[in-house]
Image (cartoon, grey):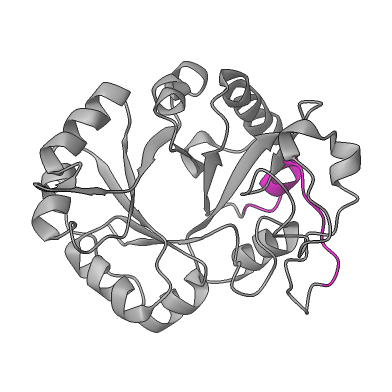
Amino acid sequence: MSIAWISHRGESIDAPENTLSAFKLSSARDVDGMECDIYFTSDKVVVCAHDSHTERTSQGVVKAEIPGTPFAELEKINVWNGKKDYPVERIPKFAEALKTLGADRTFYVEVKQDDPALLEAMAREIDEAGIPHEQIVMISFFRNMVKLSKKYMPDIRTLWLTAFEEKPDGFHPDADEMIAALRELNADGVDAHCNDSVLNPEYIQKVKEAGFYFAVWTIDTPELAEKFAKMGVDSITSNCAGALCGKLGRFESAR
C-alpha cells in the first residue's frame, strides 16, 4: 500500500487554511486527501476552522469566538490569513467543504469540540452529501470523541490524534501504551505528532502489527517526510503535501 499524502487544512502553504480555496487547491493537486477542523457555531452550524476564534486567520482584525458566534456573523469575517493571492476568504460550512472532495480522495476531519452532537451532525452531513464512508477519516485529540465516534459513524475510520510527553523514564505513550490506548478507545489507528525522538521503525511496526493504522502530522520538509516514509507510516499530513508528493513520490508503506 502506498503512503497517503494529506493536505493539512487544505493546501495551506499557498491558500488560506480551512477555506474552500485551500480545499479546492488540494483537490487539484497530486495528493491523496485533505484535512479540516470542525466546530459548531452558536447556532449549531458546522464550520471549518482550526482555532476557536478568528484573530489569527483574520490577521488580528476580528477576534470572534466561533462557538459563541452565529454563522451569519462569522461568514462576514475575512479569514485570508495573509495570503496575498487570496485577499478575500470566508469561513466555510463543513457541508460546502465536502463538495470539494474528489471522488478518489480521503477527507480527514478533526473534531475540535468534546460534544457528541457534533459527531452526530458530522455523520448527517456526510450522508446528506452522498460521500462514501470509506473516504472519511474522523480524528480528534478528545478521547471521548474517539471512543464515541463509532456510535454515530460505525463504518468510518477513526484515528486518535496525539503527541508525546517526555518523562524521566522516556517518552509516553510508548508502543505498548499506544496499543492499549487504541484498543480502549475502539480506534482504528493513531495520527501521531512526528516526533522522531520517540518514533522509529520498531515502534511504528509494533503498532501496525497489532492491527492499527499509523498516520503522522505535520511534516513540511522533504528530509523528515522521507525519514518517516521509510519508517513505514501509512500517511503523512503536510501543509505542502502537493510539493512533497511531487518531490518524493509515493513510498510503499510496510505492513
In the picture provided, is 80 more to the left or to the right than 199? right
Q: Position of residue 59 (x, y in %)?
A: 76, 65
Front-lying residue, 159 or 250: 159
The quarter of the picture where residue 56 lies is bottom right
Start-end of magenta stretch: 87-101
Q: Does residue 88 show up magenta in the picture? A: yes
**Magenta highlight on residue 52:** no
Specify whether 11 is left or right of 191. right
Q: Position of residue 217 (x, y in %)?
A: 39, 57
Query: Going by the picture, which residue comes out furthest to the front?
Result: 168
Q: Is residue 236 left or right of residue 23?
A: left
Q: Is residue 213 above or below residue 35?
A: above
| On-image quarter of the N terminus | bottom left
Residue 95: which quarter of the image? top right
Residue at coordinates 31% horizontally, 62% vertically from top-left?
2
Q: Residue at x 59, y 67 (%)?
A: 11
Q: Is residue 81 left or right of residue 109?
A: right
Q: Residue at x 69, y 62 (%)?
A: 24
The residue at 77%/62% (across/down) is: 60
Q: Is residue 213 above or below residue 216?
A: above
Q: Position of residue 255 (x, y in %)?
A: 16, 52
* Identity of the residue furthest to the top in this view: 151
Nearer-the-camera pick, 142 or 243: 142
Magenta portion: prevailing SS class: loop
